[in-house]
Amino acid sequence: MQDSDTTKYVIQATIHADGIIERPDVVGAIFGQTEGLLGNDLDLRDLQKTGRIGRIDVSVSSKSGKAAGTITIPSSLDRVETAILAASLETIDRVGPCIAQIELEKMVDVRAAKRKHIIDRAKYILTDMFNQTVPESQEIADEVKKSVRVEEITEYSKDKLPAGPNVTESDAIILVEGRADVLNLLRYGIKNTVAVGGTSIPDSIIPLCKEKTVTAFTDGDRGGELIIKELLQMADIDFVARAPDGKGVEELVQKEIVTSLRQKEPIEQAVVSYAQPVEVKRRKPDRSMKVQKRAIPKPHAVEKPQNGSDDLMTHVHALADTMNARLLDADTKVISEVSVRDLASSLKSCANSIESVVFDGMITQRLLDIASEKNVKNLVGAEMGHITKHPTAIKVLTASDL
């Protein structure tokens, strides 16, 4: 029996065997042949003990010396883990003494079925049970508005990516995983979303990201993390936002969506948070397609510091591959050393007079603006990000400029 309070998905599969088998044989084969296959986190026995999967229901019958039947497994895991578990069933090739084959038939989203029932029942209540009574509830009005918004979903580019109606004309867009995420954001009036469709980023997304201010908004699971890592390599994004742990964007209510988007990370922090051995795509200096941007000289093309360049280079070498930053005084002495992740806040709160900032990270407009406000004279980073305005009082350099 599945627990209706916790079940999210139901795995439904068929089984065929070249011999006579019974339910205990099938259940034993499922536990035995998947043991250790997916690691400790997805061990079926542990998952069943903790209630993350329900009772494995098997119905099997035999005829003419062969057996066939169905397998049903309720799951409260997330979509990715449930899909992995379902795929593992198809690796079972023997049940008892018989050669057998298990084939996944379908995955049922229990919550989707419940929502459909609620909607259908609510339509009946509104149209028949109220008997022409004019509804005055603000909640009903809001639901009507949401329905209209859902109908506004469009397709973007030749890849026919699910998108909100404002993607083309908006200066800023939100990248989400799939169509259900776009629909959920539309319900709450967010119309500048486009779905990338998983970890294989469509080609049409790359030029779009060069034209817009882009926030990647992904599920709070391993799949969402992988999508962010690929976007960091493939596309020119500006911010990263995540749904709460274990939740998908499609499940969030308005308050959770607003909170997640407000807590988005700037790209310089995201590069640190999702650092990986492979090269991460950095911002290109040439962003001429960016909306309402004007051509300006490259910030690192300024005159090199006349004094102290050797001292600054000493700090550059010391910080290489550390993802740290140093705040320096007029004598290039270290005021404090912090992680790149905390550099912006440390700059703001530092009470000392800062002459130079040297760090192992990407120079961004946000860091440049903060450094300018603190009257910093030299800002030295590992590489140059996308800069739209360059205060004349501050020298912006990369290690190759020293």
Image (cartoon, rainbow, N blue to C red):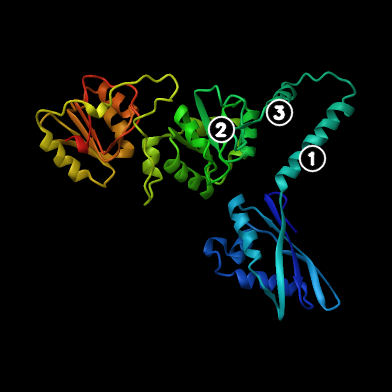
Q: Earlier in the sequence, mark 1 or mark 2?
A: 1
* Residue 78 visible to an observer of this rendering: no
Q: Quadrant of residue 133?
A: top right
Q: Is residue 192 above or below residue 18?
A: above
* Residue 49 visible to an observer of this rendering: yes
Residue type marked 2? Ile
Query: Tags 1 and 3 in contact by the CB under 8 Å rule?
Result: no
Q: Is residue 170 above or below residue 30?
A: above
**Image spot of residue 376 (x, y percent):** 21, 25
* Residue 257: mark in rendering: 2
**Image spot of residue 225 (x, y percent):** 48, 46
Q: Quadrant of residue 390?
A: top left
**Residue identified by numbered label 3:** 151
Residue type marked 3? Glu
Distance of mark 1 from mark 3, alpha carbons? 19 Å
316 left or right of 18 in image: left
10 Å neighbourhood of mark 3: few (<14), some, or many (≥20)? few
Q: Residue furthest front?
A: 158
126 left or right of 362 in image: right
Indicate the quadrant containing the N terminus: top left, top right, bottom left or bottom right. Answer: bottom right
**Residue identified by numbered label 1:** 117
10 Å neighbourhood of mark 2: few (<14), some, or many (≥20)? many
Q: Earlier in the sequence, mark 1 or mark 3?
A: 1
Q: Is residue 103 above or below residue 194?
A: below
Instruction: Tell me what residue is drawn at x 73 percent, y 56 percent.
Output: 2
